[in-house]
Amino acid sequence: VRKRATALREALHAIVLALASGDEPAGDALDLFNQELVLANGHGEYVAVGSRLEWRWRVGPNLDRMLWPVCQSAAELLGSDQLGKVKGCAAPACQVFFLDGSKNGSRRFCSASTCGTAVRVQRFRDRHRADP
């Protein structure tokens, strides 16, 4: 399951990176994602809750259970108009993608307190090193 989780993470990263760059995702990444999505959806069902239907995961001792909501959430995001709000962190050493929920779409870092602070500290040091 750990190997599958790692492979899924890498496939989703490749898919999002390609889509964010305006490219078509690689077939092998899409194939792996689709396989995991089919497996995940096979463990869920719609049940009646009052006057509506609700998606639920079946109960059972499945070690790969943690992958199911990841696949479902990724499928919802990748097929939505929210995909345009997915951005890559502006920190040079970071490869994280995040969903920019800011009003004007100007968020630059995955985390202002980690990557944002590191970049601001580096800029400060660079400015003061350049001062005579």
Image: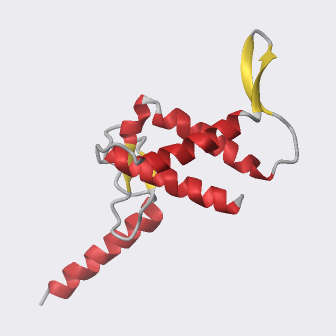
Considering every residue shown, the one lying at the far bottom of the view is 132
Task: Please state which of residues 108 and 14 is positioned toward the viewer in this rendering.
Answer: 14
Q: Residue at x 54, y 36 (%)?
A: 75
- Work out which quarter of the rendered image holds the C terminus and state it: bottom left
Task: Please state which of residues 24 and 49 is positioned toward the viewer in this rendering.
Answer: 24
x and y, in percent, of residue 30 in the image:
49, 44
- Work out which quarter of the rendered image holds the N terminus and state it: bottom right
Residue 56 horizontal side relative to residue 92, left or right: right
Residue 14 horizontal side relative to residue 75, left or right: left
Kindly indicate the quadrant of the structure image that contains residue 118: bottom left
Q: Residue at x 80, y 15 (%)?
A: 48
x and y, in percent, of residue 61 in the image:
87, 47
Task: Please state which of residues 14 and 70 is positioned toward the viewer in this rendering.
Answer: 14
The correct choice, above or below, for 16 with respect to 72 in the image is below
Considering every residue shown, the one lying at the far right of the view is 60
x and y, in percent, of residue 71 in the image:
61, 42
Q: Residue at x 27, y 81 (%)?
A: 125
Residue 109 horizontal side relative to residue 132, left or right: right
Residue 28 horizontal side relative to residue 131, left or right: right
